[in-house]
Image (spheres, rainbow, N blue to C red):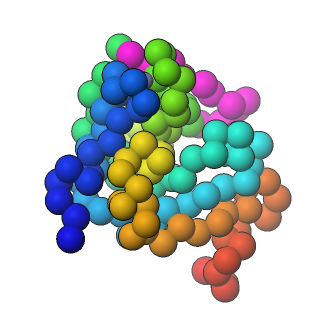
Amino acid sequence: MLGDAELQGTCHCGAVRLTLPSRPQKATRCNCSLCRRVGAVWAYCEFGTVTIHGHPENTDSYVQGDRTLRTVRCRTCGIVTHWEPLVPNSDNRHGVNLNNFDPSLLAQVKVRHFDGADTWTFLDEGAG
Ligand SMILES: [Zn+2]
C-alpha cells in the first residue's frame, strides 16, 4: 500500500515540491524531441489538483515553439518537475514528472510509450 508520503515528490535540491491527488493509474514516456531529452515519465493530472510548492518562485520554464505548454524546471538544480498549459482553461490537464517521486510509486504505474515524434499514438497498445 502506498502512504501519502509516496504521493509527494521533489526536485533534486528540494526547492520544488509536488503532491499528487492520488496514485496515478498510468503514465507516459514520450519520444518527441523535447520529452526524449528530458527523460521524463509523465503522469497526467487534472489542472489544479496537484499541490506544487516553490513554483513559480523557484522555477524557470520553457515553451517549445508554438506549443501551448510550459515545461517547468527548478531554477537551482535544473530538474524538470512538470508541465502546465499556458492558458489553463484551454487544456485541463498538466503533466507531472514521476521521476521526482519515490521509485516505488513509479514501479506500480503502468508506463505507456507514446510516439510523439511521429504518429502520435501509443506504441505499446492496440487501437485506442
Ligand atoms: Zn531543485
Q: Horizontal and vertical percent for residue 26?
A: 45, 68
Q: Horizontal and vertical percent for residue 63?
A: 62, 27
As drawn, is 42 to the left or to the right of 20? right
Q: Quadrant of residue 12?
A: top left
The front one of 32 and 97 is: 97
Image quadrant in which the C terminus is located: bottom right
Report if residue 36 lies within the magenta region. Answer: no
The secondary structure making up most of the magenta span is: loop
Give the quadrant of ligand 1: top left
Look at 27% across and 28% down and name the residue there: 53
The front one of 39 and 122 is: 39
As drawn, is 55 to the left or to the right of 38? left
The region drawn magenta spans 58-68
Report if residue 61 lies within the magenta region. Answer: yes
Give the answer, above or below, for where 71 lies relative to 60: below
Residue 68 at least partly seen: yes
Image quadrant in which the N terminus is located: bottom left
